[in-house]
Amino acid sequence: MRAVVQRVSRARVTAGGEIAGEIGLGLLVLLGVGAGDTRADADYVAEKTIGLRIFEDADGKMNLPVAEVGGALLVVSQFTLYGDARRGKRPSFDAAAPPGPARELYEYFVAKVRAAGLRCETGRFQETMQVELVNEGPVTILLDSAKLF
């Protein structure tokens, strides 16, 4: 499982002309599910995400997780995080999970975040969406359950 985690002052996702999810201060999480991923992968990425100390404390140091600043998460499914463009110019998405297992793990990830007591908005799985954000910092962190980076 892969995630692009961005610290935002606000973020919104629309689908079909309707706002699907919107947050103020918090984290925008673009989440990709890989073929063969399990709940253990989702647990790892969820725990890492909500525990990331990337918000500033009173001294201006990145030292606080999202919960300590009263932030929320906006989680958007993005299978293209598994795009492989090493051969040619058209990416292959063979490493992405099929829609059924991907949806189950995406929903499991969202449930884990909510179970931790955090507000968690979402996009719409397997729909074309438009994502708007204001990245604060900018701060962007890449996570991978296989610990490739």
Image (cartoon, helix red, strand yellow):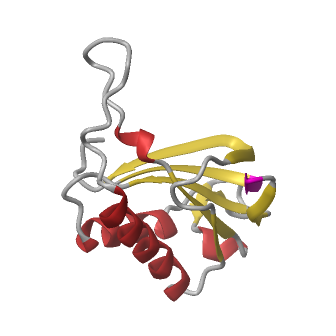
* Direction top: furthest residue: 88
Q: Which of 125 and 49 is in front in this view?
A: 125
Tell me which residue sits at (47%, 63%) in the image: 49
Q: Which of 31 and 103 is in front in this view?
A: 103
Answer whether residue 15 is magenta in the image.
yes
Q: In this view, does 103 lie above or below 12?
A: below
Q: Is residue 33 above or below residue 20?
A: above
Q: Is residue 96 above or below residue 110?
A: above
Tell me which residue sits at (66%, 48%) in the image: 129
**Image coords of residue 95 (percent x, y):** 25, 42
**Which quarter of the image is occupied by the N terminus?**
bottom left
Tell me which residue sits at (62%, 76%) in the image: 67
Q: In this view, does 140 lie above or below 87?
A: below
Q: Which of 61 and 24 is in front in this view?
A: 24
Q: What is the chief secondary structure element of the magenta stretch?
A: strand
**Image coords of residue 78 (percent x, y):** 48, 48
Q: In which quadrant of the rendered view does residue 60 lie?
A: bottom right
Tell me which residue sits at (61%, 80%) in the image: 118
Q: Nearer the viewer, residue 137 or 142?
A: 142
Q: Is residue 46 left or right of residue 71?
A: left
Residues rendered magenta in the picture: 9-16
Q: Is residue 100 left or right of residue 147?
A: right
* Direction front: furthest residue: 16
Answer whether residue 73 is magenta in the image.
no
Q: In which quadrant of the rendered view does residue 65 lie?
A: bottom right
**Which quarter of the image is occupied by the C terminus?**
top left
Q: In which quadrant of the rendered view does residue 37 lie?
A: bottom left
Q: How many marks?
A: 0
**Image coords of residue 134 (percent x, y):** 77, 45
Q: Is residue 19 left or right of residue 40?
A: right
**Image coords of residue 89 (percent x, y):** 37, 13
